[in-house]
Amino acid sequence: MAAAAPDARAISRLVIASTNAGKVREFRRLLTGMGLEIEAQPEDLEVEETGATFAENARLKAITVARHTGSWALADDSGLSVAALNGAPGVHSARYADTDPARISRLLDELAGSWDRAARFSAALALADPRGTVRIEVEGLCEGVILDAPRGGGGFGYDPVFYVPDTGLTYAEMDPALKGRIGHRGRAFAQLEAPLRKLLGR
């Protein structure tokens, strides 16, 4: 007889399938009040992101980290897709250059002279149990435009050049509460929260 699926109501520890301090910090804030001990994945664990979509990469990371740690794992794969660049950098957002300033510089160089600055941030989330079975998958989007120069000192990644017209602010100018509400990761989490609470019995 097949073994019973792990019971999420027994979760006390949740591993975020990332070593990105900014992502882990955002998830720690978003998960406040759920009674979970939040940890980043082990520094020595590398997951090759071979998926063609954000959802595929999130699934791959959640499964790998859950199996490696023997814990429930929440993975995020997110990135920036720019219309004038045919959706680039897309799933390669984190690998577009070696540092955040270099990534922003390359993006602005490639958009130089372009009138079309439309862009979209996407975040796909996947929650896997310790056996590596994906239990929840969601995706959130935030539409915006790319500015000609960075603005704001907060956030990370492409945040200083991603401007959301409805707010009049870049991601880097938003306070954490606003970014958490209207940002791609916050919108994805809003879809995750109810099924996660149900799974946790909380």
Image (cartoon, grey):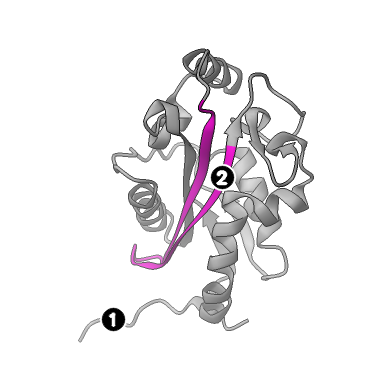
Q: Which mark is residue 3?
A: 1
126 is within the stretch colored magenta: yes
Residue occupying the point 48% across, 44% down: 78
Q: Is residue 121 left or right of residue 91?
A: right
Regarding residue 112, the answer to whether it shows in the image is yes
137 lies above or below 77 = below
- Tell me where residue 2 appears, x and y as whole percent: 23, 82
Residue 181, percent from left and from top: 69, 56
108 or 36: which is nearer to us?
Answer: 108
Q: Is residue 71 left or right of residue 23?
A: left
x 39%, y 37%: residue? 91
For numbered disc 1, what is the local secondary structure?
loop
Per the image, the residue denoted by label 2 is 143
Image position of 89 (left or right of 50) = right
Task: Specify the farthest residue to the bottom.
Answer: 1
Disc 1 from disc 2: Cα separation: 43 Å
Q: Position of residue 3 (x, y in %)?
A: 28, 81
Q: Amino acid at mark 2?
A: Glu
Residue at image position (62%, 55%) is: 186
Rendered image: mark on residue 173: none
Q: Relative to 77, does residue 93 appear above or below in the rendering?
A: above
Q: Nearer the viewer, residue 78 or 43?
A: 78
Q: Which residues are magenta?
A: 116-144
26 with respect to 15 (left or right): right
- Residue 94 highlighted magenta (yes or no): no
